[in-house]
Amino acid sequence: MDRHRFGSTNREVAVIGQGTWEIDSDDRASAIAALRLGLDLGMTHIDTAEMYGHAEEVIAEAIIGRRDEVFLVSKVLPQNASRQGTIAACERSLARLQTDRLDGYLLHWRGQYALEDTFAAFEQLQRAGKILAWGVSNFDVPDLEEALEIAGQGRMACNQVLYHLQERAIEHAVLPWCEAHDVAVVAYSPFGHGDFPGPRTKGGRVLEEIAAAHNATPRQVALRFLVRRPSLFAIPKAATPEHAAENAGAGDLHLTKAELARIDEAFPLGPRPRGLPTL
Ligand SMILES: NC(=O)c1ccc[n+]([C@@H]2O[C@H](COP(=O)([O-])OP(=O)(O)OC[C@H]3O[C@@H](n4cnc5c(N)ncnc54)[C@H](OP(=O)(O)O)[C@@H]3O)[C@@H](O)[C@H]2O)c1
């Protein structure tokens, strides 16, 4: 499993991690077996959120006795992200996860509270050792600029954003901004949340051909494309050990420049949305 340095932290984190949204509606034994096998195979970045119902409790069971292996990330809901509310939300997540610390704690998306308040709470939690790093999610460039202005360089570890082959909008401005400011970019819904290109589509056929050349699968090829730069990570969600094993296989797959260019062409970036600032 390849690792990249996680933004401004000094942690080396697995390029392929494990998402957990809706994992509490899956068969519990299978979901726990998937998470554990994922850890065995190096997918040590586990992503969750207070929003994900009972997912944090499923993770707690999966990581019993293995906490030190895990890069554990949770998120505060915007409606809880006041100065005191963020602290209280973090304590609740720690209790559900049965741990004394999070490796990352993120603002799930921007809401009504001032970023100053949320970030002050993050800094307080970090000083107390309850979180080792903090970041944001679903931030566009104007939000990132504001966050940087408030927090200063080197504080915000990551921005977790929607990124998959059929949705590459972050490449226009968010990704370059994050790279310029040493902020890790974590791709969520890397399979499009169940909308993966099928084998009969033009793009799907390209993935099949490249996969065949590596004795790999189209999903492994897709994941690898998404983590092709040192700033990038992906967190596919899997509820079965078979899916987890397949996803982990992307962690040491290496694609040639020509193959990356073919994928780039098969899943075009699309025009720059109007109104996006130029970097
Ligand atoms: N920050 C945010 O706002 C935000 C938003 C969305 C998601 N996220 C995070 O990102 C994670 C991933 O995104 P996602 O859950 O939306 O979707 P996803 O990872 O793009 O796709 C998950 C779907 O793909 C299936 N799958 C996974 N591995 C597979 C494989 N090897 N073969 C066939 N099917 C496979 C899963 O099936 P099974 O479940 O049956 O294995 C599930 O139906 C979330 O779980 C969450 O942690 C964050």
Image (tube, rainbow, N blue to C red):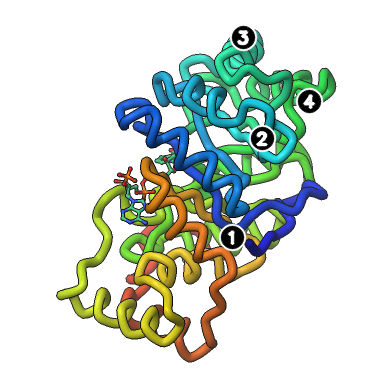
Residue appearing at x 59%, y 64% in the figure: 176
Residue appearing at x 39%, y 60% in the figure: 164
C-alpha span from label 1 to label 2: 16 Å
Mark 3 vs 1, N-terminal side: 3
Q: Secondary structure at mark 1?
A: strand
Q: Secondary structure at mark 2?
A: strand
C-alpha span from label 3 to label 1: 30 Å
Question: In which quarter of the view is residue 91 placed?
Answer: top right
Q: Identify whether 188 is placed above or below 134.
A: below
Amino acid identity at mark 1: Leu
Dot 3 beta carbon under 8 Å from ligand 1? no
Rendering coords of residue 188 (x, y %): 45, 48
Rendering coords of residue 88 (x, y %): 62, 9
- At label 4, counting other C-alpha atoms closer than 10 Å, the crowd grade (few under 14, some 14-19, many 20 or more) is some
Residue appearing at x 25%, y 74% in the figure: 204
Task: Give the residue number, with chain letter if any, for mark 4.
Answer: 126
Rendering coords of residue 54 (x, y %): 42, 19
Question: In what quadrant of the picture does the C terminus appear?
Answer: bottom right
C-alpha span from label 4 to label 2: 10 Å
Tag shown at residue 104: 2
C-alpha span from label 4 to label 1: 24 Å
In this orientation, which residue lies closer to the viewer: 155 or 126?
126
Task: Give the residue number, with chain letter if any, for mark 1.
Answer: 232
Tag shown at residue 88: 3
Report if the CB atoms under discs 3 and 1 are less than 8 Å apart. Answer: no
Query: With 16 as the anchor, is 111 left or right in this view?
Result: left
